[in-house]
Amino acid sequence: MVTQPILKISHLSSSFKSGHNYIKVVDDLSLHINPGEVVGLVGESGSGKTVTALSILQLSNCLLEGSIELNKHELIGMKQEELRNIRGKKIGIIFQEPMSSLNPVFTIGKQIAEVIENHEKISHKQASLKAISLLENVGISQPDIRYHEYPHQMSGGMCQRVMIAMAIACQPQLLIADEPTTALDVSIQSQIITLLKDLKKQYNMSILLITHDLGIVAQLADRVAVMYAGQIVEDAPIKEFIKKPEHPYTLGLIKSLPGKHKHGEKLFSIPGTVPNPLSWPNGCHFHPRCSYVEDQCKVNNPCLFEVSPGRQSRCFFAGRLPDEK
Amino acid sequence: MNKKSYRHFIFRKILHNRLALTGGIFIIILSLIAFFASLIANDKPILVIYQNRLLLPCIYVPQDLKQADWLNIINKSDFSISPPIPYSPIGVNLNECLLAPSPSHWLGTDENGRDVLARMIHGSRISLQVGIIAVGISLIVGVYLGAMAGYYGGWLDSLISRFIEIMMCFPFFFLVLAVMAFLEPGIYKIMIVIGLTSWTGIARLTRGEFIKIRNEEYILAARCLGLSNSKIIFRHILPNAIAPVLVSATFGIASAVLVESSLTFLGFGVQIPTASWGEILSQGHKYLTIAWWLPLFPGLAIFLTVLAYNLLGEGLRDALDPRLTGSGDSW
């Protein structure tokens, strides 16, 4: 039996309006997430990860083309009221900056209870009881006391736990985690990762993990999709991806990870910088920085195609790249 | 950090600001005077035991005593407590016209022999009501329009902003005067007219705050959690935006008090014999040369009230603006 993906994005492109022009920041993006699967969406700053996340929720202020299906329901063009029933209920989201993602004038408990009351027919009392048990669930000690505290009284890690509690309050099928650990220090990072792992099992939800940290993806994700300049360049199961990348960009990323290099040796880096969305190159977006570039790369932009079962790459040389390890 | 640390911080800063504190205390005392006006200045006793009946004539007068001579009753009664100022604001006594301030009439009497202090105490009700009701109306209109413009932006923002600018082009006082000229004089009409013409500043301030806050991450988070626009506007943005708006409303109260006095002085406000500060001033200016106390005391009261509101508003503004935090006073 083939499992139906929870979320299926096909050929999505998002463009911001700037004056009379549209600036494309996400281009021909296709991605699916199966039930219970953790998909890592990796990319540099400005590669379109967050815009993708907000596009899924129809909150990106972009012109969207293509299709985003949640359980076979098309989200693009859906009515605002229906969308509100999906946001927070079917899809939860957590952000990069936990401190600024909570409203400073309300207690954290009130904010969680509000989400529950918004989506479920439930009395105020029951909602606050549920909020307390959620706080306990995300590992906050003394949840009944913390319920009455304001965001500024908590540390960043605790705020992120509160954000997670809000995101999972209505048992969403999909949790979008937009760089959930970037603003936290390393020891808190690993705690949050462990928490996300536990919650995923407990609630049997899928997670779209957006990050630029390959280490976190390796710990948590089943599959990884790498974005470069608005496009997905490679989509592969995490183990195979680390063993043998099928795109020159991801090859470069893996090579630049510290670990294999000799002591005192400089880390590898890909030459050049990420192109600005205003001036994406013709042909393959990566070709100006690619060491395998050929004439066809400068003219034609390759599609995302299947290299081997479950693996996709956007490179003419996929499957033929030299194994540099 | 204790639970209400931010509110505590603001409160402490106001307490440390002597001028703002004075303004606040003055307004509290004035509110108490206005609230208990009929117990402070009245020709009826506060409490009297008369023919074995316990009466509170300041609050309720029984049917059979409507025409009674209270002075007579007080003399005959076993026990009575009289108000500290035993004159009614409308009690005409032509034997005591235009008396200068004296121990029996602390602030003198007017041309009809009415006690000026009693009239001023009852007039304080009008001044406070004008301030609060007029600013309440302008807060409702201004915050609502400003919130819509700031939150939704686009053509709605352009429409509301242009409307605000058109309203601001009219000189405020003459707009109120022109509208009042078409209406029958009356104090509640003045309050409504002041409220409906003075909301522009509040609307612009609210719009600015909303534009700033709608781009905060927690508002995006609220939208991602599926909250409706009205919940986001009124529950999530408004509490964050209201502080500077309230500061400006405090100044608004001061200006409303002043406008009401001016309008009443010009004859558009309360009608005889109701007392208000502007009305005493208006009646008194005719006797300026022979009865200096008539314009002086209500003028002083208006001046002090406006000053008190301004001091309080300034203190509130300083307390809410962290950039103006004085040296050594840290979070």
Image (cartoon, rainbow, N blue to C red):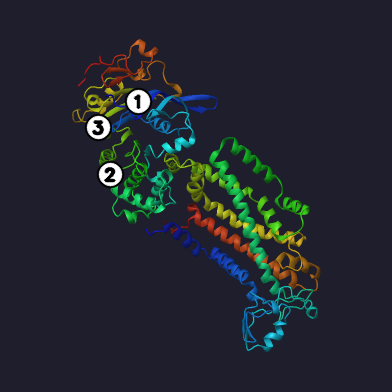
Q: Which amino acid does the dot numbered 3 rest on?
A: Ala
Q: Same subunit under labels 2 and 1?
A: yes
Q: Which amino acid does the dot numbered 2 rest on?
A: Ile
Tell me if residue B233 comes above or below residue B10 in the rendering.
above
Q: Mark on residue A188?
A: 2
Query: Would you say residue B214 is visible in this rendering?
Result: yes
Instruction: Tell which tag, 2 or 1, sits nearer the viewer.
Output: 1
Which quadrant of the view contains residue B294? bottom right
In which chain is the residue bearing label 2?
Answer: A
Residue B312 position, x and y percent, is 56, 61
Marks 2 and 3 close (CB-CB < 8 Å): no
Residue B217 position, x and y percent, is 43, 41
- Residue visible at 44% across and 60% down in the picture: B8
In which chain is the residue bearing label 1?
Answer: A
Q: Quadrant of the N terminus of chain A?
A: top left
Query: Would you say residue A271 is visible in this rendering?
Result: no
Q: From the viewer's perspective, tell me whether residue B244 is left or right of residue B71.
A: left
SS state under label 2: helix
Tell me if residue A185 comes above or below residue B18 in the rendering.
above
Which quadrant of the view contains residue A144? bottom left
Separation (CA) of disc 2 from disc 3: 17 Å
SS state under label 1: strand
Separation (CA) of disc 3 from disc 1: 19 Å
Residue that carries the numbered disc 3 in the rendered image: A218
Q: From the viewer's perspective, tell me whether residue B155 is left or right of residue A84.
A: right
Residue that carries the numbered disc 1 in the rendered image: A31
Q: Nearer the viewer, residue B95 or B75?
A: B75
Which quadrant of the view contains residue A24? top left
Q: Nearer the viewer, residue A283 or B222?
A: B222
